[in-house]
């Protein structure tokens, strides 16, 4: 918290800090932000990662489209403007969890470099782990259990990422997971190798 903010909001002089919460939870909070096409495997890996971290004693929270679009952001559509606002709100909520010492696992397409820079700026670069869940679009379409790609190909869904709305692959993600090459266990092991040193609390 900057000195300027303390002057404007004196309450910050006495509320507990992120470091206090981390000491209580015995973990360092991080935001694990998974980006990638629909069907790449973000939600599956997020769920598996959460279970793996839970078994190791870490407190986490998954944030994804299912628990955001049905509540906080149910008034937003899928235009470029609404997508940016969707991600801005998600990043602000994520920052609240972060400041409580909670490790968040975010699963969102986050299709553009601009969008990823926005959420990283809000969350804070030091606490942001960008994970590219990568699979060729052909593989994603073959996994299309909800039939979204088929509808998009027929023009029934507009502004669908990868079809009529662009996806800009991250150039330098912290971790890249090729789900067409790794199984779920291998993917989670790779993530844990990178994440554990960043969240491990040492007295």
Image (cartoon, rainbow, N blue to C red):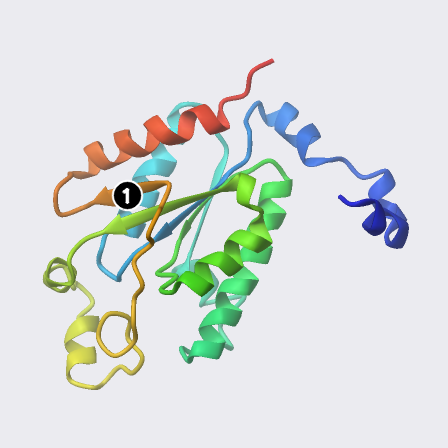
Give above or below for 75 relative to 93. Answer: below
Query: Residue, x 48% and y 76% (percent of image)?
Result: 82
Q: Position of residue 24 (x, y in %)?
A: 64, 25
Q: Residue furthest front?
A: 171
Q: Where is the C terminus found, in terms of image quarters? A: top right
Give above or below for 96 relative to 71. Answer: above
Q: Where is the N terminus found, in terms of image quarters? A: top right
Q: Position of residue 3 (x, y in %)?
A: 84, 45
Q: Position of residue 48 (x, y in %)?
A: 30, 38
Query: Residue, x 27% and y 29% (percent of image)?
Result: 189
Q: Residue furthest bottom?
A: 155
Relative to 128, 180 lies left or right: left
Residue 192 occupies quadrant: top left
Relative to 171, 201 lies left or right: right
Q: Which residue is mark 1?
A: 176
Relative to 92, 108 lies left or right: left
Q: Nearer the viewer, residue 145 or 13?
A: 13
Q: Position of residue 128 (x, y in %)?
A: 49, 43
């Amino acid at each position: 918290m900057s000195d300027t903010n303390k002057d404007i909001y004196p309450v910050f002089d006495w509320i507990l800090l992120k470091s206090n919460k981390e000491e209580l939870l015995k973990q360092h909070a991080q935001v694990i932000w998974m980006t990638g096409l629909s069907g790449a495997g973000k939600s599956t890996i997020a769920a598996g990662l959460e279970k793996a971290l839970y078994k190791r004693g870490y407190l986490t929270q998954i944030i994804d489209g299912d628990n955001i679009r049905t509540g906080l952001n149910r008034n937003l559509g899928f235009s470029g403007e609404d997508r940016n606002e969707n991600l801005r709100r998600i990043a602000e909520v994520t920052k609240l969890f972060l400041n409580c010492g909670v490790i968040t696992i975010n699963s969102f397409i986050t299709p553009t470099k601009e969008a990823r820079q926005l959420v990283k700026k809000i969350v804070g670069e030091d606490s942001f782990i960008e994970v590219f869940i990568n699979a060729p679009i052909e593989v994603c379409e073959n996994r299309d259990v909800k039939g979204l790609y088929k509808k998009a190909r027929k023009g029934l869904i507009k502004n669908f990422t990868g079809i009529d709305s662009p996806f800009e692959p991250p150039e330098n993600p912290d971790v890249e997971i090729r789900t067409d090459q790794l199984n779920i266990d291998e993917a989670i092991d790779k993530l844990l190798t990178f994440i554990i040193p960043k969240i491990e609390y040492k007295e």
